[in-house]
Image (spheres, rainbow, N blue to C red):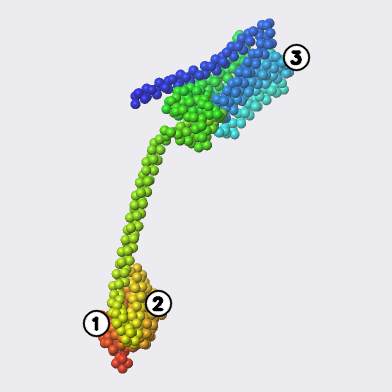
């Protein structure tokens, strides 16, 4: 950990040195331009082409401020701040243009005087723009200052109007009474002049205070660097006000000196980090270690690249323009359009690819396991289905096994006598039909009872009706009555009623001549049977819930099957 920290500190110091060496070239060009202009000023003061060198000096300053405005537009990150700084460069160009027109173009006193008044356009609005710039620092790129800041423009505009209309009121500059020509060579200062000066100083000081509070490098040793040109500018204005004779001889007029100080002041703010710029990309990328970023032009030619970056082909970059492209080694190439080209970077997704491969293997394994489980489930489902079928078959067989056995015996007898005793054969077939009718209906009730659900009385009524229809084959007279108030009964009670009925008629099926059935709810669910046969049915009275009565005159045996707790539902 200590070695990593040591290496990071070395890289940080190297980057810091490079970032501070980079401004040397433009600052050297600015210094050269100022020295050259100053030299032309000295030469122009003599008799050797004074007008030519004065023009050249003006062109140097105007070109310098124009180049500075162009560089500002490219360097400053925040859109609103960049617009204000470009406005400052335009005002500085206008200032020097007015100055050149005053001294070298116009000769009429009025025109010269108004060119002098126009000096206060940049002198009032440049400090105000500096304040607006300071208020915009640290805000998002699309941030707009509140509408209330128009008051600052209103104050500057009002003071400028006072200056431009000075000939009407002389509240800013005063001229001697009776003077033939009003000029800046012989004038005094009115009360509004001091308001103009105070407003300039107020805006400049407020801008510096805002920048100091918003600066991200508050502990930097160059924190107060912008104060130097500001202090020099104030000192120059003070000395110029008291009329120091050597000031203009040594440093030139207010326009040349103050415009240069404004530009240097803003550059000092940029250098200190008060105004953030996007310059020094080359050194930043050259000192970047452990990143994978690079910047290309529109043809994907690399302009800036971090150290130790893996080379990326142009074809890959062009493919990544539409969608990220993964290359060998698990690197995904991304591109993003920027002004004048593309930002290209890579993302190491090898770990994600390994996880994906592992997940795919796991998915295949799970798919195989799921297939085995599905196969086992199908087998288990099939086995359970067979077991359920066997259980239901056993249940149905146990409920009707007695009738099945009797049908088997009757069938054997039928085969034995089918050709010898025709009447007996008809009797056998009728008995088999009666037994089959019961088996059919009893199996249906058995399935319902297995599901533990209630049975409609109409279902039981149909079972009785079907059985009575088959009994007619044996010439058995029958009647059926079912209480219409009955609707639903339990499955177990329905099966018990049908079983009791079948047991009674099978007791003497061959000699049965008449059956009367009544199912009603009389103090409970009751099945009443009036049976006429030769067999004594009193044996059924041994059951606790069966009442037996013999009607000797009519030859009927009366049985009442009482269902315990079987009231109709």
Of pointers 3 and 1, the one earlier in the residue sequence: 3
Residue found 29% across the figure and 80% down from its top: 412
Of pointers 1 and 2, the one earlier in the residue sequence: 2
Observer-nearest of 9 and 351: 351
Task: Indicate whether 205 appears above or below 241.
Answer: below
Dot 3 falls on a residue whose secondary structure is loop
Residue 551 relative to residue 48: left or right = left
**What is the number of the mark on residue 542?**
1
Label 3 or label 2, whichever lies nearer to me, is 2
**What is the number of the mark on residue 169?**
none
Residue 413 position, x and y percent, is 29, 82
Measured Cα–Cα span from mark 3 to mark 2: 134 Å
Numbered label tally = 3
Measured Cα–Cα span from mark 3 to mark 1: 156 Å
Evaluate whether residue 161 shows in this view.
Answer: yes
Label 3 or label 1, whichever lies nearer to me, is 1
Of pointers 3 and 2, the one earlier in the residue sequence: 3
* Image-quadrant location for residue 404: bottom left
Q: Quadrant of the C terminus?
A: bottom left
Observer-nearest of 237 and 443: 443
> 10 Å neighbourhood of mark 2: few (<14), some, or many (≥20)?
some
> 10 Å neighbourhood of mark 3: few (<14), some, or many (≥20)?
few
Q: Are marks 3 and 2 in contact (CB under 8 Å)?
A: no
Observer-nearest of 173 and 276: 276
> Which residue was labeled with disc 3?
180
**What is the number of the mark on residue 458?**
2
Task: Indicate whether 425 appears above or below 273.
Answer: below
Residue 205 position, x and y percent, is 55, 23
The residue positioned farthest toward the front in the image shown: 419
Residue found 32% across the figure and 61% down from its top: 384
Residue 39 relative to residue 324: left or right = right
Evaluate whether residue 218 shows in this view.
Answer: no
């Amino acid at each position: 950990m200590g070695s990593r920290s040591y290496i990071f500190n070395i890289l940080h110091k190297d980057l810091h040195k490079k970032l501070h060496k980079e401004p040397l070239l433009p600052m050297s060009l600015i210094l050269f331009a100022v020295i050259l202009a100053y030299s032309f000023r000295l030469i122009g003061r003599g008799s050797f082409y004074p007008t030519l060198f004065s023009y050249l000096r003006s062109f140097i300053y105007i070109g310098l401020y124009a180049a500075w405005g162009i560089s500002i537009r490219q360097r400053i990150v925040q859109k609103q701040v960049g617009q204000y700084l470009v406005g400052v460069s335009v005002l500085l160009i206008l200032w020097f243009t007015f100055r050149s027109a005053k001294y070298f173009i116009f000769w009429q006193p009025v025109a010269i005087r108004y060119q002098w008044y126009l000096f206060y356009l940049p002198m009032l609005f440049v400090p105000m723009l500096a304040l607006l710039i300071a208020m915009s620092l640290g805000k998002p790129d699309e941030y707009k200052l509140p509408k209330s800041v128009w008051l600052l423009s209103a104050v500057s505009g009002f003071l400028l109007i006072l200056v431009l209309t000075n000939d009407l009121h002389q509240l800013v500059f005063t001229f001697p009474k009776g003077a033939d020509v009003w000029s800046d060579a012989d004038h005094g200062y009115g009360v509004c002049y001091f308001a103009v000066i105070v407003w300039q100083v107020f805006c400049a000081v407020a801008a510096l205070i805002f920048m100091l509070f918003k600066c991200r490098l508050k502990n930097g040793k160059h924190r107060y660097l912008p104060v130097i040109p500001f202090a020099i500018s104030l000192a120059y204005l003070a000395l110029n006000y008291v009329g120091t004779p050597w000031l203009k001889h040594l440093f030139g007029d207010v326009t040349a000196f103050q415009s240069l100080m404004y530009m240097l002041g803003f550059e000092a703010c940029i250098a200190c980090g008060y105004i953030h710029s996007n310059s020094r990309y080359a050194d930043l990328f050259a000192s970047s270690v452990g990143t994978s970023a690079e910047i290309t032009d529109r043809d994907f030619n690399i302009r800036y690249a971090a150290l130790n970056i893996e080379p990326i082909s142009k074809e890959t970059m062009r493919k990544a323009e539409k969608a990220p492209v993964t290359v060998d080694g698990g690197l995904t190439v991304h591109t993003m359009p920027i002004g004048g080209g593309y930002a290209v970077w890579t993302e190491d997704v090898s770990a994600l690819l390994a996880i994906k491969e592992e997940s795919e293997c796991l998915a295949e394994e799970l798919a195989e396991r799921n297939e085995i489980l599905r196969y086992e489930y199908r087998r288990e489902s099939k086995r359970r289905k067979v077991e359920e079928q066997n259980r239901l078959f056993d249940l149905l067989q146990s409920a009707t096994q007695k009738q099945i056995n009797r049908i088997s015996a009757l069938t054997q007898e039928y085969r034995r006598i089918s050709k010898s005793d025709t009447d007996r054969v008809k009797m056998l077939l009728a008995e088999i039909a009666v037994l089959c009718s019961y088996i059919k209906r009893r199996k249906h009730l058995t399935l319902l009872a297995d599901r533990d659900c209630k049975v409609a009385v109409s279902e039981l009524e149909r079972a009785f009706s079907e059985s009575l229809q088959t009994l007619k084959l044996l010439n058995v007279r029958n009647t059926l009555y079912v209480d219409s108030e009955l609707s639903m009964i339990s499955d177990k009670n329905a099966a018990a009623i049908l079983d009791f009925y079948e047991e009674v008629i099978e007791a003497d099926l061959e000699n049965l001549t008449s059956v009367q059935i009544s199912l009603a709810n009389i103090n409970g669910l009751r099945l009443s049977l009036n049976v006429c046969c030769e067999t004594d049915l009193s044996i059924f009275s041994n059951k606790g819930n069966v009442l037996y009565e013999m009607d000797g005159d009519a030859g009927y045996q009366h049985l009442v099957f009482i269902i315990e707790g079987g009231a109709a539902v």
